[in-house]
Amino acid sequence: MTTIFRLDASIRDEGSVTRAVATSLESALLADAPDTKVLRRDIARDPLPSTAWANALRGFPIPVDERTAGQREALALATELGDELAQADAFIFAIPMYNFGIPPHVKAWIDVLMTDPRLSPRGTKPMAGKPAYLVLARGGTYGAGTPREGWDHATEWLKLILGTIWSLDLTVIETELTVAHLNPALADVHELAAQNLERSHAAATEHGTALAERLKEAEAA
Ligand SMILES: Cc1cc2nc3c(=O)[nH]c(=O)nc-3n(C[C@H](O)[C@H](O)[C@H](O)COP(=O)(O)O)c2cc1C
């Protein structure tokens, strides 16, 4: 059976753009491949313990019977998270921008995962070449020539981890200006913001359909 892993990270349940766009992709995939299993981890609703990363790092080089209970728990958590990724055939990562970077619970999740020898920068890369979709949303706009060009410290970092370090076959679906409609002073970009959102849903649906095809072909091969 084909399995996809979906990560959600928005602190919003209602009105979340990343959740909604990721769902467009997932729904299109399931429409064509209804037997697909979706393995979900919502790290906004269930964040990892803040002590897990340091405990896993400190515990790793220590002989098993000398590890503290916290170190054993943290290393078991890293393995559990790593297994979730290693067993999946495709991935959806739905991640908002907060304070010009990634959410702290996403950083914590990735840091713990990178203590798993499979997923460290010199790891065995169990997900190499598998299809992955990074669904991003940000309230502002950071493109070339905009006043805040260079202030987006989320996108390139996530591409580095997912695409370069973990070697996923990564596609980015990004939506900008997601909060423009709340600000009457930005009335001149309201239409552009609505178009951005519409385009992201259309792209997500298209990618979901293509992913179903790709996974079917991979299963048949
Ligand atoms: C605490 C907080 C901080 C934010 N910081 C930024 C920011 O630095 N830059 C930006 O463009 N948008 C920022 N936003 C807006 C979010 O990126 C935007 O609302 C996005 O759509 C959130 O994802 P979601 O729709 O899936 O919840 C912030 C939102 C919150 C709640």
Image (cartoon, helix red, strand yellow):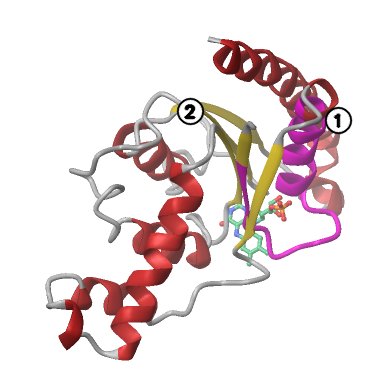
The quadrant of the rendered image in which ligand 1 is seen is bottom right
Where is residue 207 drawn, in percent x and y?
A: 68, 20
Disc 2 or 1, which lies upstream in sequence?
Answer: 2
Kindly tell me whether residue 141 is visible in this rendering: yes
Magenta extent: 5-29
Q: Is mark 2 within 8 Å of ligand 1?
A: no
Q: Is residue 79 left or right of residue 47?
A: left
Residue 139, above or below 63 = above
Q: Is mark 1 within 8 Å of ligand 1?
A: no
Residue 85, above or below 132 = below
Magenta run includes residue 87: no
Q: Is residue 99 left or right of residue 20?
A: left
Where is residue 15 drawn, in percent x and y?
A: 84, 54
Q: Quadrant of the N terminus?
A: top right
Q: Nearer the viewer, residue 73 or 107?
A: 73
| Secondary element at image label 2 | loop
Amino acid type at circle 2 is Ala
Q: Nearer the viewer, residue 42 or 78?
A: 78
Please give the residue where the numbered disc 1 appears in the rendered image: 191
Q: What is the CA distance from the residue labelled 2 to the residue labelled 1?
A: 20 Å
Kindly tell me whether residue 192 is visible in this rendering: no
> What is the tally of numbered marks visible in this picture?
2
Say few, some or many: other residues with alpha carbon within 10 Å of mark 1 (under 14 / 14 to 19 / 20 or more).
Answer: few
Can you tell which quarter of the image residue 37 is in? top right
Where is residue 54 drawn, in percent x and y?
A: 28, 77
Which residue shows up at 33% across the image and 89% down it? 69
Magenta run includes residue 17: yes
Where is residue 62 drawn, in percent x and y?
A: 13, 77
| Secondary element at image label 1 | helix
Which residue shows up at 42% across the image and 48% down it? 153
Can you tell which quarter of the image residue 75 is in? bottom left
Please give the residue where the numbered disc 2 appears in the rendered image: 144
